[in-house]
Every structure is written in structure tokens, then in C-alpha cells.
Image (cartoon, rainbow, N blue to C red):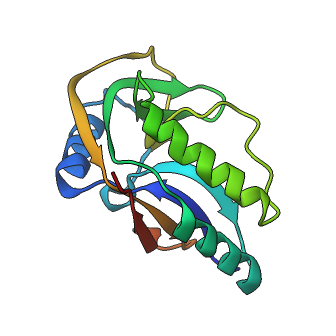
Amino acid sequence: MTDRLFFALWPGERQREGLARAQRELPIDRGRKTHPEDLHITLVFLGELEAERRACVEDLADRVRAIPFTLVLDRIGCFPRTQILWCGASQRPQPLLDLLGALETGLRDCGFRPESRPFKPHVTLIRKARAMPARELERPVSWPVSDFSLVSARPGECPRYRVERSWPLIS
């Protein structure tokens, strides 16, 4: 099986520590915690790509122009159907939506269709978890976003994600 790829926001050490703290403080009695080195926000899932399509995706990323922004992760919630506990943002900054829009628009030229579900920026903290009511995060995680990354998923490994390439956001 080949690696599956996706565009993501990859946290710095300070943000990773804040997310790991939020994960530890969750009152859970079951579930599988995301490895701290795997915490991220998926922007666009790409799947398995042959060389030509991957080159198209990377060329697109080379051309994306978006400005840096700060994302404040201030909510804990649950996707009951998928049994995922997450940490997310109650506000989606316009530069984040612009970055996502630029990626989705450019990916059409590489043969991708945009995601039909609305974008909900979140970090998966625990999988196979019991549902819990959404609430504010006691200590929000402020995340200055200055780049985006192409990440590969390596099945069966831990940590399972590896940043392949990153592109800066430019003011």
C-alpha cells in the first residue's frame, strides 16, 4: 500500500504541547489517543497519488499565495458518528478560508473535486471515544500559522504522519 497524502497545518512545539495537555485533561474511559507527534489540522485529503498527479499537487502548492494568520483552538467537541473527540476553533479566520479556497480551486486542475462537507478546522485528539458535550477549552491554544504542509500517512507506524514538504504563507 502506498502512502496517502494530505495538505495540513502542522503545529509548532508550543501548540503541540497545548494540544497534548488538552488531550490529557479529557475525562475519557475509552478511546485511542492520537500520538502527540501526529496532531495536526487536515486542510485537504488527497489520497494515494501517482507521480504525475503528485507533481501537479506540488506545483499548485508552489503557486498558492496566502497570508499568515493566528488560529485560536478554544473548543472541545465530538463527532458522534465517527467517535472522534476534537479540539477546534470557534472562529475561522478569513486567511484560513482563503488558503483552503486557493488549494481547492487549484486542485481542480489536478483532477480533484472539492469536499462537499463544510470545513471545520479541528485536531483529532481521541478516536473511538464516547460522545461528550461540546465545551470551551479551559486554556485555549493560540496557533500562529505561517506555513502549510504536504503530509504522508504511513499505515502501521507510530507516529504515522510525516511532513513531506512545507510552503510558507507570505504577508
Name, please, the residue furthest toward the front: 171
Q: Pinpoint residue 152: horizontal percent, then vertical percent.
A: 54, 71
Q: Nearer the viewer, residue 162 or 22?
A: 162
Task: Work out which quarter of the rendered image holds the N terminus and state it.
Answer: bottom right
Q: Is residue 142 above or below residue 14?
A: above
Give x and y (percent) for residue 171.
Answer: 33, 51
Q: Is residue 54 left or right of residue 36?
A: right
Identify which residue is drawn at 46% across, 19% down. 132
Left or right side of 77 for 43 = right
Query: 26 or 64, which is in the foreground?
Result: 64
Q: Is residue 114 visible?
A: yes
Determine the image quadrant of residue 165: bottom left
136 to 124, vertically: above or below: above
Q: Where is residue 166, by image quadrant?
A: bottom left
Q: Nearer the viewer, residue 151 or 31?
A: 151
Residue 71, image x and y in percent? 33, 36
62 sits left or right of 145 in the view: right
User: How many numbered markers are drawn?
Assistant: 0
Q: Is residue 52 left or right of residue 66?
A: right
Q: Residue furthest bottom?
A: 51
Report whether residue 122 is seen.
no
At a point 67% along the width and 50% down the height, the residue shown is 104
Where residue 13 appears, x then y in whole percent? 20, 57
